[in-house]
Image (cartoon, helix red, strand yellow):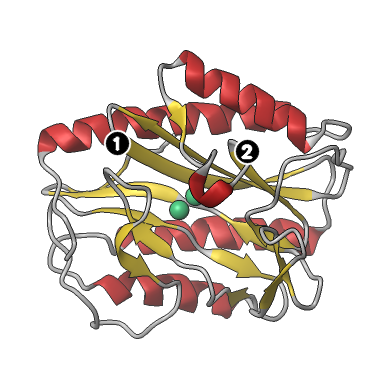
Amino acid sequence: MIELKTLSQIASMRKAGQIVAETLALMREMVHPGVTTEELDRVAEDYIRKQGAVPAFKGYNGFPATLCTSVNEQVVHGLPGLRKLESGDIISIDCGAVIDGYFGDAAVTLPVGDIAPEVKQLLQVTEESLHQGITQAVRGHRLYDISYAVQSYVERYGFSVVRDYVGHGIGKAMHEEPQIPNFGKPDRGPRLDVGMVLAIEPMVNKGTFEVRTLNDHWTVVTKDGQASAHFEHTVAITANGPEILTRC
Ligand code: MG
Ligand code: MG
């Protein structure tokens, strides 16, 4: 069952979403050659706690950090550590926060210094595919209209969508029903309604869609070693259309 949130619940989620958005804005300022992913993580955790919120990922299934930091061929769930970012890298930063019992969840992929033109295009296409998906998040549409919008946009550019990880409903838990694949046929799946809150999150690979998990049991990488990008927003379906709760 997909839970419908009241306006006051959505207001709480807006608060959580804003903290996540502000944290990611801070990360955007910090990402440059020489910074370590651990430094990013520390600043993000401090910021979230100063707002009276709690990092949502820390301790989730034993995840050790506030951020998922996934560099280059890493798709999602990368662990912050001593790695220094270098010019030409890209870094996907996924962040969640919980306040007053409600969750916000968002991700961006940022360039480090100068990146190759085709990687820049990967970032642009992935971010735009998220917005193509969000446009479908309206009352009366069906869930896989979102999936189809993402996939068809991405594949137009010769990139591929990851199949093994999906978006999700969100609210009093980080992962609620429904699962939101980034691929699928339009006009299928549950009917969308006002009060649904969805974390829509295309993960897009430059090469094959296939992924594998490293021996650290967390970091997901592309099978072919090519770059991957990830953008995510928490989106409420309102009577006036989609509202991005994690907008910067
Ligand atoms: Mg996320
Ligand atoms: Mg998510």
Looking at the rendered structure, the kind of residue marked 2 is Ala
The answer to whether residue 21 is above or below residue 242 is above
Residue at point 83%, 57% (across, down): 116
Q: Position of residue 66 (x, y in %)?
A: 58, 36
Residue bearing the label numbered 1: 102
Q: Is residue 44 left or right of residue 165?
A: right
Q: Indicate yes or no: mark 1 CB to ligand 2 under 8 Å.
A: no
Could you tell me residue 8's position as x and y percent? 13, 32
Distance CA(mark 1)–CA(mark 2): 19 Å
Estimate how packed mark 1 is, as few (under 14), some (14 to 19) or many (20 or more) residues with alpha carbons within 10 Å: many
* Nearer to me, 118 or 212: 212
Considering every residue shown, the one lying at the far front of the view is 62
Give percent across and percent down for residue 22: 49, 26
| Three-letter code, disc 1 | Tyr
Disc 2: CA contacts within 10 A as few (<14), some (14-19) or many (>=20): many
Q: Which label number is shown at residue 54?
A: none
Q: What's the residue at 63%, 54% (across, down)?
A: 77
Q: Taking 215 as reference, is 246 left or right?
A: left
Which residue is disc 2 drawn over?
65
Q: In the picture, residue 46 is in which quadrant?
A: top right
User: SS for tag 1?
Assistant: strand
Inspect this view and state whether residue 120 appears: yes
Q: Is mark 2 within 8 Å of ligand 1?
A: no
Is 35 in front, or is 152?
35
The answer to whether residue 199 is above or below residue 226 is above
Q: Is residue 118 left or right of residue 96?
A: right
State the residue at coordinates (37%, 68%).
180
Q: Is residue 31 visible?
A: no
Identity of the residue drawn at 64% across and 31% down: 27
